């Protein structure tokens, strides 16, 4: 898709579907969450997040779910947000890719301007896909892998929140692509507003943290942004510093 379309410059965030408030009872089997609605009913919602969700899945917290009347769906509800003491937190891991894509397209990411086309879900080698390929008429190519970050402690955002062999593979792939004269970017989207700094979570996945340090030395660029989030929409926020 063309990345320089002026009509996209007005992009002001992704709207949420109609949100239904409730209280989180429990999250289990990774993809299931029981939510008590305001009328006393308990429904089971799909949890679109395969991570551990440390610091954003505490029972008793207010959550917001959406309803989808699709006959093909076994679970009609989807968990979208959780209200934590210092910020709303976006739970849905489908959101970062859409938000970053639209934000780049609208010229909202200064570091990723100057490209004419954006192609999502690009196969880069056997068994490996990266989230975005940016290109321009001069045949400059930039590969972007987007990671959803929701783990925040003491105003520090951490990734990953569980051991990720897939994420490690992506870092290696980005380094290989940089070696072929392509620009390579790892983009961490912090889906909450209470972080001031980003660090790799070496206390959770030391191998990933070490590979990220290696990737930066080998030319992979690291971008970290947070979001502005409310019950109406989510949009790209400010750039955050990082420390490896």
Image: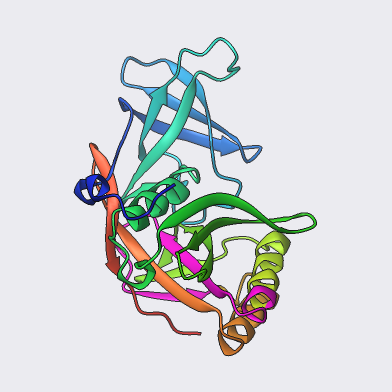
Q: Position of residue 18 (x, y in %)?
A: 30, 25
Depicted 234 relative to depicted 4: above or below? above
Q: Nearer the viewer, residue 169 or 209?
A: 169
Q: How many marks?
A: 0
Q: What residue lies at 47% left-to-right and 32% top-to-bottom? A: 25
Q: How is the image coloured?
A: rainbow
- In the orientation shown, which residue stands out farthest toward the right? 126
Q: Which residues are magenta?
A: 176-200
Q: Could you say which is closer to the camera, residue 123 or residue 30?
A: 123
Quarter residue 203 falls in: bottom right
Which residue reaches farthest front? 137
- The percent coordinates of residue 179 (x first, y second) are 66, 82
In this view, the residue in front, 81 or 237, is: 237
Q: Does residue 60 lie above or below 211 as drawn?
A: above
Residue 100 horizontal/vertical position (percent):
40, 54
Residue 85 visible somewhere in the drawing: no
- For the point 33% across and 28% down, the residue is 17
Residue sitting at x 27%, y 60%:
237
Quadrant hosting residue 174: bottom right
Task: Give the residue at the far top of this rendering.
Answer: 71
The answer to whether residue 136 is visible is: yes
Where residue 217 sits: x, y (%)?
58, 90
Q: Is residue 185 magenta?
A: yes
Near-viewer residue (230 or 30): 230
Left or right position of 56 against 214: left
> Does the magenta-highlighted stretch encompass residue 221?
no
In the rendered view, would you say 113 is above or below 119? Answer: below
Question: Measuring 57% from the left and 61% from the top, which residue is drawn there?
Answer: 161
């Amino acid at each position: 898709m063309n990345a320089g379309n002026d009509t996209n410059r007005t992009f002001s965030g992704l709207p949420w579907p109609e949100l239904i408030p409730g209280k989180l009872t429990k999250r289990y089997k990774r993809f299931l969450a029981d939510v008590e609605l305001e009328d006393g009913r308990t429904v089971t919602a799909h949890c679109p997040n395969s991570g551990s969700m440390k610091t954003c899945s505490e029972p008793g917290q207010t959550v917001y779910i959406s309803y989808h009347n699709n006959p093909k769906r076994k679970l009609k509800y989807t968990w979208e947000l959780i209200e934590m003491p210092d910020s709303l937190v976006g739970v849905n891991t489908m959101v970062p890719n859409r938000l970053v894509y639209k934000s780049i397209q609208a010229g909202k990411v200064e570091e990723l301007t100057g490209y004419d086309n954006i192609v999502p879900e690009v196969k880069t080698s056997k068994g490996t896909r990266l989230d975005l390929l940016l290109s321009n008429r001069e045949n400059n190519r930039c590969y972007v892998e987007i990671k959803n970050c929701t783990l925040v402690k003491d105003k520090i955002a951490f990734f990953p929140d569980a051991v990720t062999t897939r994420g490690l593979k992506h870092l290696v792939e980005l380094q290989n692509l940089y070696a072929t004269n392509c620009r390579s970017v790892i983009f961490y989207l912090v889906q909450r507003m209470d972080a001031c700094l980003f660090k790799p979570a070496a206390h959770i996945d030391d191998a990933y943290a070490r590979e990220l340090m290696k990737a930066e030395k080998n030319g992979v660029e690291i971008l970290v942004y947070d979001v502005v989030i409310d019950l109406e929409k989510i949009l790209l926020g400010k750039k955050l510093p990082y420390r490896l």
